Amino acid sequence: MHIPVLADEAINFLNVQKDGIYVDATAGAGGHSGKILEKLERGALIAIDADGAALETAASGLEKYAGKVKFVNGNFADIGAILNGLYIKGIDGILYDLGISSMQIAEAKRGFSFMQDGPLDMRMDTNRRFNAGDIIDSYPEEELRRIFISYGQDRWAARVARRIVEARKSEDIKTTLQLSKIIKDSIPAGYIRKSRIDPSTRIFQALRIEVNNELKNLSDTLPGAMSFLKPGGRMVVLSYHSLEDRIVKNFFRGNKGVLKTLTKKPVVPSDEEVGRNARSRSALLRAAEMMPPVKYAGE
Ligand SMILES: C[S@@+](CC[C@H](N)C(=O)[O-])C[C@H]1O[C@@H](n2cnc3c(N)ncnc32)[C@H](O)[C@@H]1O
């Protein structure tokens, strides 16, 4: 089961009005969507997810709100086209809860987890072809090293890249556990013993970001979403690592005259929430509000 992270905080920052139009850009299991829908009377929610299976789960859990919610299987990078396609001119708020859901991690065949064996897949949108196996099979060593450094910030990036290229000369690297073993074999045993996280964590994160184009999607969606926000409308983003959070922070800063930042520092979960839901431990929430249009003398 996926437990929504910073749910009360996210909904408070969205400042849901009962007749407003809201977008949940990452509907997932529908946890945050349900909380928005609870508050809507005459308003509407557009619930987007790139993963068709996730959207089906959300839709079945939110059946009682059927008249108020429109589900869209799409990429939030296309937010402009999605909203134009629904003839929506302005929105009162948009929420992003980035990354993957517990459902996606739990399903071995999606290939997101190094704790259970599955194919090297990691696609959120299963209609796309490119997957983690393609990266492991075909990227040159320097490219592997680059993504492990840029997207995994992994100190052993060079060693892991070299070991993968060596290993693939003699074996087909097809599964998550095979890859996880190669990663472990690349890193000094003493370091693994002392480390608080599994040595595969950062490498798997890097592969997932590359497969799904995650940072570019985020950079592409924010300006599009902002252009639909009504004055007073809110944008709330939950990130799970510094690469995402930096994009959001810089976007808010770069649009100072248009967006008012509501969170000087990112809001993080309480110890109580982390105790209840380990997935929340790296969450960083930022929120901003659309300012009224500037009035010029004589207008
Ligand atoms: C952390 S989960 C969201 C969980 C949800 N807030 C809930 O409470 O159940 C993130 C979801 O975003 C989706 N996602 C990630 N990137 C996306 C993108 N570019 N466009 C649309 N959906 C995306 C994933 O498929 C996943 O279902």
Image (spheres, rainbow, N blue to C red):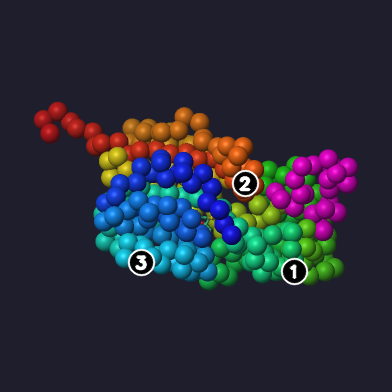
Residue 30 is a magenta residue: no
Pick whichever of labels 3 and 1 is earlier in the sequence.
3
Checking the image for residue 276, the label placed there is: 2
| Residue drawn at (70%, 49%) of the image | 202
Q: Residues within 10 Å of mark 2 (few under 14, many from 20)?
A: few
- The structure residue drawn at horizontal position 52% and vertical position 69%, both measured from the top left corner, is 53
Q: Secondary structure at mark 3?
A: helix
Q: Is residue 192 magenta?
A: yes
* Cα separation between marks 1 and 2: 34 Å
Front label number (1 vs 2): 2
Which circle's residue, 1 or 2, is located before the other in the chain? 1
What residue sits right under mark 3 in the picture?
66
Q: Nearer the viewer, mark 3 or mark 1?
A: 3
In the image, 159: left or right of 94?
Answer: right
Q: Which residue is mark 1?
A: 174
Residue 185 on image: x %, y %: 86, 54
- Residue occupying the point 56% across, 63% down: 124
